[in-house]
Amino acid sequence: MGGHKKLIHFLRADPAPGSALSSPRSFSSNDSSVSDDDGYNSSPSSFPASAASSPSRYSPPKSPWAATTHLPGLGADGSAATGLIASLVKEDGKVYSLAAAGDVLYTGTDSENVRVWRDRRELAGFRTGSGLVKAIVVAAGGRIFTGHQDGKVRVWRADAADPAVHRRVGSLPALGDYLVSSVNPSSYVALQAPRRRRRAVWLRHADAVSCLSLDEPAGLLYSGSWDRTFKVWRVSDSRCLESVPAHDDAVNTVAAAGFDGLVLTGSADGTVKVWRREQPAPGSGDRTRHVLERVLREGDGAVTAVAVCPEARAVYVGSSDGLVACWRWGLDGEPRLGGVLVGHRMAVMCLAVSGRVVVSGSADRTLCVWRRDDGPDDDRCRHARLAVLAGHTGPVKCVAVAAADDEGCYDGGERRFVVYSGSLDGSVKVWRLSEDRPLEPPPAVITEPATPSMPALLESEAWTPRRTVALAPPPELKRVAAA
């Protein structure tokens, strides 16, 4: 137990949203059970938390609505108010990625570690041995996929007997597939603007894996990279089915739409592209084929995040200009711009959607929470801003939102959510959120009435009466948003 002293997790509720966090320091460990993928082993790679800080895995999970620290202006009703539950802080570097799966939360940092949390306490962690963890997705069956700075995707699985232990069970591409392809000259492709080499094997990313998206019904995993491509992997056997040269600059975000076989990619080149998955042609084997259907967005600002609500056929796009645009796919299969959400003063860095709730995180250190109020037609909608969550002392790099329970409904019943936000300040914050009426105006936001000098889009009926002023981010923040 003594050897894990500095791994002891501490959970503290912030007394105020402006509380300063201590400067994070890089975590170091002598754990050497995980080697590089060129010869990885399957020995346990977890470092379990101390017994003092880890809840029993047999204890029932506690509701995040049981206790909270309220933010100023969010009300005092302990049963329904939106508020901050807790801050999860490790001296473990900056938080770049997170994923929620049931009552378990996974967080990735720039110190090669993935932490596993349950009931807002550290359950375990595992060292990836491969640099910055830029993306995490969790698949059914307990597999965890992580995207890394070295261009690889690792596959992990929790031990059936002890969920605190995680083992690496593979990597994408699989070592055998890569070796076979590397000796075949036809497997090499030229890179558009290589950062590391002029030619590379097509089934392996030549630069950092920046994003991941899982299409569970199709059994496919999508990975986007700074090498300007996205790749399609079959989850069942980890095979790379396709590599698509997608953009003229780094791919920052990829999202499987969940309807019509669509996949969306966003890039530092300022575009959002919509790709359609076609059925394999006869005689082509089981390879997928994605064709470009349309360019949804073109602009000067880098596209930093894309999130999708399949039920509403709605797509949200965040960009370095601080805006979140919403498109709705009509019954005719055509997308229409439903409005633009103005709430941040700096670059949007992440987005998450659950039902009617949309959460955006920004380099301005805040999160904006919106509720989509569906209109009578199928392509336009209103958005009411529910709250602005302030408490991080660094840019918000990743966010996830999940329904807190199955109660409530859209036609009058209040629905409650839990929001997880990870920041470059080294902390993960857990918020509770009510889908109740919005606060007017939301707290911690400077608002002013719309003026004729604002873009014409601001005057559309998709906008709420009060709007925040979106300031153009300085160039260095645009670089941070894309990092």
Image (tube, rainbow, N blue to C red):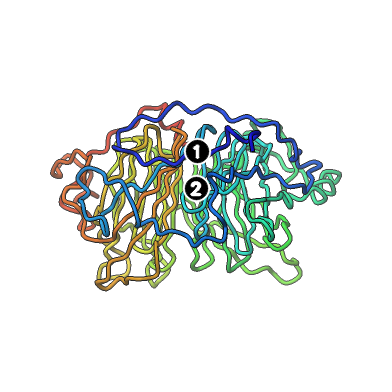
Q: Residues within 10 Å of mark 1 (few under 14, many from 20)?
A: many
Q: Residues within 10 Å of mark 2 (few under 14, many from 20)?
A: some
Would you say 370 lies left or right of 126 here? left
Q: Helix, strand, or loop for circle 1?
A: strand
* The label number, if any, that marks residue 121 in the structure image: 2
Answer with the quarter of the image where residue 208 lies. top right
Would you say 382 lies left or right of 113 here? left
Nearer-the-camera pick, 182 or 391? 391
Residue for point 83% across, 50% down? 176
Q: Position of residue 438 (x, y in %)?
A: 21, 55
Residue for point 62% across, 36% down? 4
Circle 1 residue: 95
Q: Position of residue 52 (x, y in %)?
A: 54, 44
- Mark 2 or mark 1, which is nearer the start of the sequence? 1
> What type is the residue that disc 2 sits on?
Arg
> What type is the residue that disc 1 sits on?
Val
